[in-house]
Image: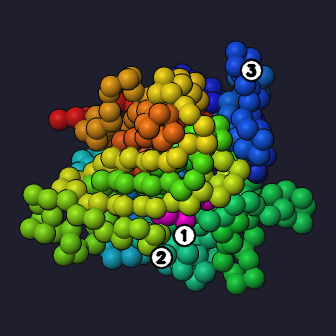
Amino acid sequence: MSARPAAPGSRRGSTAGPATRTTRPAPAARASAAPAGAVRAERATDSAAVPTRAPRTARVAVLGASGYSGQEFVRMALGHPGIEIALLASREHAGRKAAELLPGLDPRALAWRDAVAPDQLADLLLKGAFDTLVACLPHGVWRALSAEQPALAAKPARIVDISSDFRDGAARPATAHGVPAGRGRAPAPGASGSIPSSAYVYGLPEAFRDSIAGAARVANPGCYPTAATLALLPAAEAGWLAGPVMVSALSGVSGAGRAPALRTSFVELEGGASLYRAGGDHPHIAEMERNLARLAGGALPVGFAPQLAPMARGILLTANAPLARAVTPDEARAAYRERFAGEPFVRVLDDGAWPETRAVRGSNRCDLAVTTLHGGRTLLATAALDNLVKGAAGQAIQNLNLMLGRPETEGLTVHGSPW
């Protein structure tokens, strides 16, 4: 198992763990264990017992650099000592100058030339222009492109996919040499020439850190599932959740992507909030259910009510679930604090304090608050995060740090920008 990160700014190595989640040992100070059948996520052991390896660097091609998550990734990576932005690729803006593609960045600090077309990437990869690909494309596009260009999907040393295309990969198949595909080498293409979903590790470090360290392919979680999973993680691991989970969340408009749409235009959205795809229709529901099943050791159905709010960025989420036994508010808060102790990017708020999106804006931090209702038989868990950072680009850098054997907090901030 790999070590849980220390506080931001510290330097601690990580090592690769098994492809599936392992059972974490109970802390010595706590004798109680999870109910039978509950599956524990990878957790940190004593860092003194964990070997370290020399950190690597990455020369990154950003595919889909003109989108919100692509631009945010580039902005954050430019300040990272272990990540070099080698080139930008865009389907719609190939040939445009990088400074035009990324209007928030100072062109005097940009060393790249024009953005390239995606069909140029395979040749550039063979010429050594980059070794790592970060795909920031709309959902479905990277899966199609990887089938059209199998070399681009198979040859990079590392790929982080920010879309939902490969998040359903639960385990990595062994190669002919017995080495799990995606651990230390690029996986071989499937029968169709594309990389199978099972080659991708699901990249939520706070839950599944060990399977990310040293992986070659990581599927970055969605913004809603990141918030929902972190909000419910301790309760799911402890076996508290007794039935269907209801999740409601407000999202900033950047979560809908940069492509123009009537419902995200200023006149349609300003001054109000609106529900969309509520109930069981939203594609993130399956991702939430997969995560909860892995954490709890059994299926937990999810209902979801997403809402667009007139703000550029942020997720404010509430999750409710019946509990298998009575849990007091103090017991719930203590369990959450213990579970996330040492997690640099998760903060459990004090009693009476509740998350707000502006407090985490621009940071890789997720704020949580938890209590119980109805005599301790109902869980109320809340979360706030920046959908473009912890919900996308920041989490991609967090995963890249683990893949490279670098300090997990490197290049990331826990501090928000409220104003």
Residue 66 showing in the rendered view: no
Q: Where does the image place residue 32, in percent across and percent down from the top left?
A: 72, 25
Callout 1, which amino acid? Asp
Provide the residue designation for mark 1. Answer: 165
2 and 1 marks in contact (CB < 8 Å): yes
Residue name at image x 28 percent, y 65 percent: 275
**Residue type, numbered disc 3:** Ala
Secondary structure of the residue carrying tag 2 is helix
- Which residue shows up at 56% across the image and 34% down it? 326
Q: Are marks 3 and 1 in contact (CB under 8 Å)?
A: no
Q: Residue 10: image x %, image y %?
A: 54, 22
The residues tagged by marks 3 and 1 sit, at their Cα atoms, a distance apart of 41 Å
- Of labels 2 and 3, earlier in sequence is 3
Q: Is residue 334 above or below residue 399?
A: above
What residue type is disc 2 on? Val
Q: Which mark is residue 73?
A: none
Q: Is residue 174 above or below residue 81?
A: below
What kind of secondary structure does the magenta stretch mostly adopt? helix
Q: Residue furthest top?
A: 29
Counting residues from the start of the chain, the first of labels 2 and 1 encountered is: 2
Label 1: how many Cα within 10 Å (few below 14, some 14–19, many 20+): many
Report the quarter where the C terminus lies: top left
Residue at mark 2 to residue at mark 3: CA–CA distance: 48 Å
| Magenta span contains residue 286 | yes
Q: Residue at x 50, y 54 (%)?
A: 245
Number of numbered discs visible in the structure rendering: 3
Which image quadrant is residue 210 in?
top right
Q: Which mark is residue 141?
A: 2
Identify the magenta region.
284-291
Comparing 269 with 334, the one in front is: 334
The reply to whether residue 303 is in sight is yes
The residue that label 3 is drawn on is 31
